[in-house]
Image: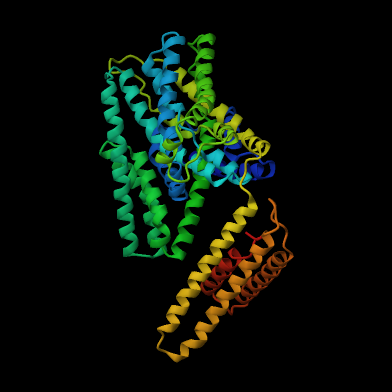
Amino acid sequence: MDVSTVLVLVLAAVAAIVVTHRVAERTGLPAPAVLTVVGICYALLPGPNAELDPHVVLTLVIPPLLYSAALNSSLRGIRDNLRTVISLSVLLVLATALLVGAGFALFVTGATLAAGVALGAAIAPPDPVAALAVGRKVGLPPRLLSLIQGEGLLNDATALTVLTVAASAATGSGFSAWSALGRFIEAAAGGVAVGLLVAYAVRWLRRWSQEPLVLNAVSLVTPFVAYLLGEEIHVSGVLAVVIAGLAIGHQGSRSVSGASRLQVNAVWQLIDFILEGMVFLLIGQQLPTVVRGLDHYDVSTVVIASAISVGVVLLLRPLWLLVTQFMPRRLHARLGGEGSERLTAREVLVLSWAGTRGVITLAAIYTLPLVTDSGAPFPDRDLLLFCAFLVVLVTLVGQGTTFAPLVTAVGLRANPVDQARLRNEARSAAARAGLDRLNELQETKHEADEDEAFAALRAQIENRLDRYQRRLESLEDADDVIPTNPEYEAALRLHAAVIDAEREELLRLREIGQLPDSSLRVLEHELDHREVLLPQRHPR
């Protein structure tokens, strides 16, 4: 494939991502599911098609996506719900792999246990991108969002380790339960150690320089350093990326300036947008490849293998969630912290339907070797590829498109009034802390000409406190809908009109030669920050 063809494919992919996201916004459908369908439609057209290279995906795509998700995850939320997170990201992955393996060994003609376990490990880890996108849009409670995030961050390491062990057994390298357990513990412990080491190094670099461009460069290379270092010493590179992201994100507010954080966040939002779009388009384009490999299988064999794969994935998750809720309450608290409580029936239902699979499943199954140590073809590799693709398709499109209606039907969402009240109380507390510090500084000041500066800043903080208090008062009688506040609606219109007028005047001065472009960009940057800080249409 020549360079011009690659460029055309990339441009077409970016255009498809932009258009698909617009369609998703208009229809309310999750963009990942729509992108997957678009990828399938494109794959059916004549012309070149992109094939999934598992090593490229695992090395260049998965690390930045996991790192970005970890940066924006709640370490406190994961810790408070540690029992459920471990249950879903480790124990459920192991149970899924073993159950699929047993099903293949018992009911699929000629299939081996090791090959079935390899498939089970690949299809076990959910990809939370679609569920989180929908969950945030419909207002899922923070606890459920933390559970979905925590599971999605930690389950990949479990699945890839199990897959490696199962693939070794299937290719004739031998299998030992104790050896597999030791390998799993070694990979997990090593991944945690590498992640903490990388996080410490990044923290040191942040002390050395607060230049936004330097911190951007450090942030961009961090997931690749963590992943490659973990893989180089034969531990879990995926877990190293996740631990590094969680540690860095948890301490980021103290070690990064505001300007650097704004820029770094903007860069990662763009990376997420492009990579996630490319990933889901790539998933859809694998359809012709996986279908071609089924020519030498009986229809009954394909149907049985598909039923086992999809059935285990769809049925085991809700059963697992239900059974684990009957564990002793003291064990819930011991493993999950003070905030760990049993899930309600509605929460179990929503979490059961949040298990969408994604690119990690296909990348994992594609890593299976073509031949065994003896030179024979890997057992049923084409069938395993098809089953993995089918699971991704059923969960991503089927569960992904119905997740929002399900959440709406069960009425499980965060109360927007409670969220608004919590945020304004936190704003008030932060403003009071700032006012207290200002008073302390004024008591120790030595320059009389600073009085005016103290008075001006105190007036600004007191005005903010008054504004937050009025917002809280407007929420006192609200139920679950934030009332429209004419004051903030008017403020939005007035501020927007003033900023537009200022921007037009700056452009006019540039056009008549009174303002150089370099100065225009500086002043536009100031206006952009003011525009970002405009009051929301509803007080939050």
Residue 215 seen in the current view = yes
Above or below residue 333? Residue 487 is below
| Residue sitting farthest toward the bottom | 448
Res 331 quadrant in image: top left
Residue 381 seen in the current view = no
Left of 314 or right of it: where is 96? left
Above or below residue 414? Residue 454 is below
> Which residue is rendered at x = 40% and y = 83% of the image?
444
**Count of marks placed on residues:** 0
> Which residue is rendered at x = 55% and y = 82% of the image?
456
Q: In the image, residue 216 lies at what x, y percent?
A: 41, 57
Left of 405 or right of it: where is 442? left
Res 303 quadrant in image: top right
Q: In the image, residue 137 lies at what x, y percent?
A: 62, 46
Q: In the image, residue 165 lies at what x, y percent?
A: 32, 25
- Report the colour scheme: rainbow
Foreground of the two, 164 or 451: 451
Quadrant assignment for the C terminus? bottom right
> Which residue is rendered at x = 53% and y = 20% of the image?
311
Foreground of the two, 515 or 464: 464
Q: In the image, residue 68 lies at what x, y percent?
A: 45, 48
Foreground of the two, 414 or 67: 414
